[in-house]
């Protein structure tokens, strides 16, 4: 395994729980009190799209597909959730270091 693949795998292990929790908080197609890990199984497909910089349209389409095929409930929040997870990815991984506040 090369360094880039190892780094991507480590990033997934370290931060995938954040994405699962975000999906629970902003997407939540079931719409009732569900366990925090309710959407963990759907997170990897969203992660792959984010990692590939697929864009909010593709992410919203994937969330809609999951709703239709797996959950059988229309979330009505697919676009908002796609926007939220895209913003999370940007701030977590893509925000340019040169724009970050200087702590020194």
Image (cartoon, rainbow, N blue to C red):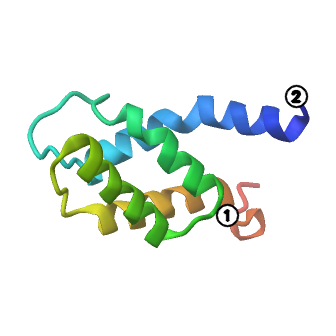
Question: On the image, which quarter does residue 40 sit in?
Answer: top left
Q: Quadrant of the C terminus?
A: bottom right
Task: Name above or below for residue 33 compared with residue 99.
Answer: above
Per the image, the residue denoted by label 1 is 101
CA gap, disc 1 and disc 2: 34 Å
**Is 83 placed left or right of 2 in the picture?**
left
Residue 37 x, y percent position in the rendering:
32, 28
Q: How many labels does the image show?
A: 2
Chain-order first, disc 1 or disc 2: 2
Q: Is residue 92 visible?
A: no
Q: Position of residue 45 (x, y in %)?
A: 50, 45
Q: Residue at x 81, y 37 (%)?
A: 5
The foreground one among 15 and 4 is 4
Which SS class for mark 1? loop
Q: Name the residue under label 2.
A: 1
Q: Residue furthest left?
A: 32
Q: Which residue lies furthest to the front in this view?
A: 69
Q: In this view, does 50 lie above or below 7?
A: below
Q: Residue at x 40, y 32 (%)?
A: 41
Front: mark 1 or 2: 2
């Amino acid at each position: 395994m090369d360094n880039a693949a190892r780094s991507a795998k480590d990033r997934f292990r370290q931060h995938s729980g954040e994405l699962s929790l975000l999906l629970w908080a902003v997407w939540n197609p079931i719409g009732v009190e569900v366990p925090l890990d309710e959407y963990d199984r759907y997170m990897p497909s969203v992660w792959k799209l984010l990692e590939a910089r697929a864009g909010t349209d593709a992410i919203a389409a994937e969330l809609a597909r999951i709703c239709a095929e797996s959950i059988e409930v229309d979330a009505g929040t697919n676009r908002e959730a796609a926007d939220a997870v895209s913003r999370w990815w940007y701030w977590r991984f893509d925000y340019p270091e040169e724009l970050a506040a200087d702590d020194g």
